[in-house]
Image (cartoon, rainbow, N blue to C red):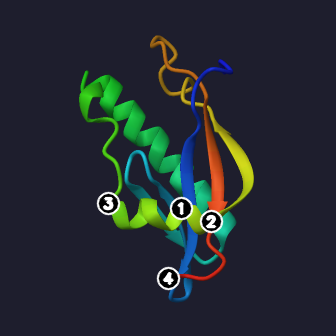
Amino acid sequence: MSPDIQPLTILCYREGDRDVAHCLEMDLVAAAPTREEAVQDLADIVRAHVRYAVEQDNLAHLFKPAPEAYWSRLASATLFGKLDIDLSGDLPDRPVSARRFELRELAESA
């Protein structure tokens, strides 16, 4: 991964009895019983989303930002990790590589 690529953001928060992982730049969401499962499920969703966009030659619609309400919650979130999602495995003949995500967590669901 090139060091000059800006990481994307995954905001993690609790919603009811589920942990939610939300990629803010793509407005993709996964919910699961644990934060780790939600993040892993979201990684799978991101891979499928990128694969579909590349296969359909529809990169213009790859990034659709989450609503402002979620971005405003980011200010109170704490960085707790980083995740590299390898996007090249499903598209070996395409110029798509790993992408870094910053994992941020809200202390309490708002």
Distance from the alpha carbon under mark 4 to that under mark 2: 11 Å
Distance from the alpha carbon under mark 1 to that under mark 4: 11 Å
Under circle 3, the secondary element is loop
From what the image shows, is residue 76 above or below residue 109?
Answer: above
Under circle 4, the secondary element is loop
Say left or right for 75 vs 72. right
Under circle 2, the secondary element is loop
Q: Are marks 1 and 2 in contact (CB under 8 Å)?
A: yes
* Residue drawn at point x = 52 percent, y = 48 percent: 44
Mark 2: which amino acid?
Ala
Q: Earlier in the sequence, mark 4 or mark 2?
A: 2
The residue that mark 1 highlights is: 74
The residue that mark 3 highlights is: 67
Mark 3: which amino acid?
Pro
* Residue drawn at point x = 37 percent, y = 67 percent: 69
The residue that mark 4 highlights is: 110
Q: Are marks 4 and 3 in contact (CB under 8 Å)?
A: no
* Residue drawn at point x = 33 percent, y = 35 percent: 62
Q: Earlier in the sequence, mark 2 or mark 3?
A: 3
User: Where is residue 76 drawn, in percent x and y?
Assistant: 60, 68
Say left or right for 53 vs 104. left
User: Where is residue 59 drawn, in percent x and y?
Assistant: 30, 26
Distance from the alpha carbon under mark 2 to that under mark 3: 16 Å
Mark 4: which amino acid?
Ala
Kindly identify which numbered label has been placed on residue 77: 2
